[in-house]
């Protein structure tokens, strides 16, 4: 039987400390890239204001996936099985209206061009629309269920700090 050597003890001591000036210049870690999204529901709140939900998402995702993953209503009356195509781009039940941020979205696909040829140019199919690239930053404002919208509304651009306070309070 071999003997097991006794564990060695380590002595750790500080050689020097970081100076105050070297740590004060350290940058805060940068927030990872994300796209801020504002979803406006087609039905007004009881006080007559639009029902707006704010979400953040990394880029390079389908708008449909972002909406479903963050519990934003997408299909309205078409949410039951067999009433929508599940993201294939063939039924056009996931139409949304892009109010702002179209530059962050992918170009219209052939499916969209076919299904939305009689609709305004800012209407998109959420299942065919990719939001940004992995390093994208910006704001996208989406009107949910635009074909069911029975009101008009206006919005004002908020500064990023104001928008973040709105997102955090939502």
Image: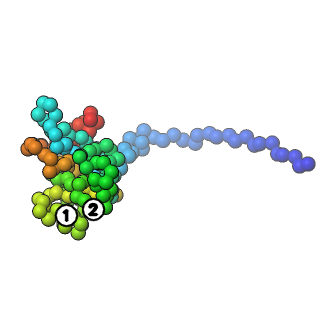
In the foreground, 142 or 132: 142
Task: Give left or right: position of 71 versus 149.
Answer: right
| Res 122 quadrant in image | bottom left
Residue 39 location (% of width, % of height): 22, 45
Determine whether label 2 and label 1 are within 8 Å by CB. Answer: yes
Question: Residue sitting at 54 percent across and 41 percent down?
Answer: 16
Give the residue number, with chain letter if any, for mark 2: 89
- Disc sitting over residue 67 in the figure: none
Quadrant for the C terminus in the image? top left
Residue 12 location (% of width, % of height): 64, 40
Residue 20 location (% of width, % of height): 42, 38
Residue count near mark 2 (Cα–Cα under 10 Å), binned few <14, some 14–19, many ≥20: many
Above or below: residue 79 compared with residue 88: above
Residue 96 location (% of width, % of height): 20, 53
Give the residue number, with chain letter if any, for mark 1: 115
Residue count near mark 1 (Cα–Cα under 10 Å), binned few <14, some 14–19, many ≥20: some
Task: Give left or right: position of 51 versus 84.
Answer: left
Task: Give left or right: position of 35 versus 10.
Answer: left
In the foreground, 89 or 126: 89
Above or below: residue 96 compared with residue 150: below
Task: Give left or right: position of 60 versus 17.
Answer: left
Question: Residue sitting at 23 percent across and 46 percent down?
Answer: 77
Q: Earlier in the sequence, mark 2 or mark 1?
A: 2
The answer to whether residue 59 is visible is no
| Number of marks in picture | 2
SS of the residue under disc 2: loop
The answer to whether residue 84 is visible is yes
């Amino acid at each position: 039987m071999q003997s097991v050597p006794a564990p060695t003890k380590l002595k750790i001591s500080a050689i020097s400390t970081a100076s105050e000036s070297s740590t004060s210049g350290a940058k805060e870690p940068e927030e990872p890239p994300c796209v801020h999204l504002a979803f406006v529901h087609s039905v007004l709140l009881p006080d007559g204001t639009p029902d707006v939900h704010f979400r953040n998402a990394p880029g390079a995702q389908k708008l449909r996936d972002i909406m479903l993953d963050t519990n934003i209503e997408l299909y309205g009356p078409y949410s039951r099985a067999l009433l929508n195509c599940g993201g294939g781009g063939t039924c056009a039940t996931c139409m949304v209206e892009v109010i702002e941020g179209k530059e962050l979205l992918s170009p219209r696909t052939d499916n969209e061009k076919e299904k939305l040829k009689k609709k305004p140019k800012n209407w998109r199919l959420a299942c065919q629309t990719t939001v940004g690239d992995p390093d994208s930053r910006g704001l996208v404002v989406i009107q949910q269920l635009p074909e069911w919208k029975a009101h008009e509304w206006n919005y004002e651009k908020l500064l990023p700090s104001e928008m973040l306070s709105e997102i955090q309070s939502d």
